[in-house]
Image (spheres, rainbow, N blue to C red):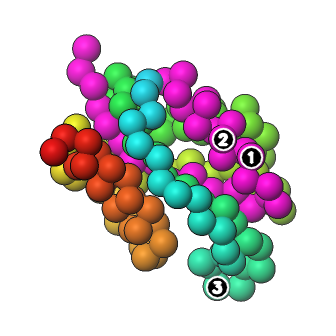
Amino acid sequence: MKTHRYVLLLGTSLASPLVLERAIESLAVEGLIEAASRRVSGPSISAGDARHFHNQAVVLATALTREALPARLKQIEAALGRTPNAPDCVIDIDLACECDGHGIVLWRDDRKLGHTLFLDLMQDVLDQLRGSHL
């Protein structure tokens, strides 16, 4: 069984970031959380969006393929209470990149990494992977 490593970006517009912990616990059922970034809080990066968000990145090591992972992420989001067109974003889990065990990026989704906040969070977890193999 091949292990894939993915950097996932997590976000919530709820007042409390506790749902990020619940999301990480749900992701851990799918494999091993090998790294987690610091949590950051601030205004939405989308123009005209008045909401504030809590964001974090994690590295998930799993047997799930890149093709199978998005559907599983949507299931986890729904289980945590995300509903389409809701005013609050209960949880958003996006696949940002796939990397190897040394933090080298093999594939990335630049649509998910269009803001320096997300690039910084991704870099944080990739640096953790790189540091763990020195």
- Looking at the rendered image, the disc whose residue lies closer to the viewer, 1 or 3, is 1
Where is residue 18? Give x, y as percent: 74, 46
The residue under label 3 is 47
Q: What span is in magenta? A: 1-30
Q: Secondary structure at mark 1?
A: helix
Q: Is 88 on the left or on the right of 118, as rendered? A: right
Where is residue 17? Give x, y as percent: 73, 53
What's the mark number on residue 18? 1
The residue under label 2 is 21
Mark 1 residue crowding within 10 angstroms, few (<14) / some (14–19) / many (20+): few
Q: Is residue 106 visible?
A: no
Of the 4 image quadrants, the one containing the N terminus is top left
**Residue that lies at the very extreme toward the top in this rendered image:** 1
Q: Secondary structure at mark 3?
A: loop
Mark closer to the chain start, 2 or 3 = 2
Of 1 and 123, the residue lying toward us: 123
Give the Cα distance between marks 1 and 3.
Answer: 26 Å
Is residue 28 magenta-colored?
Answer: yes
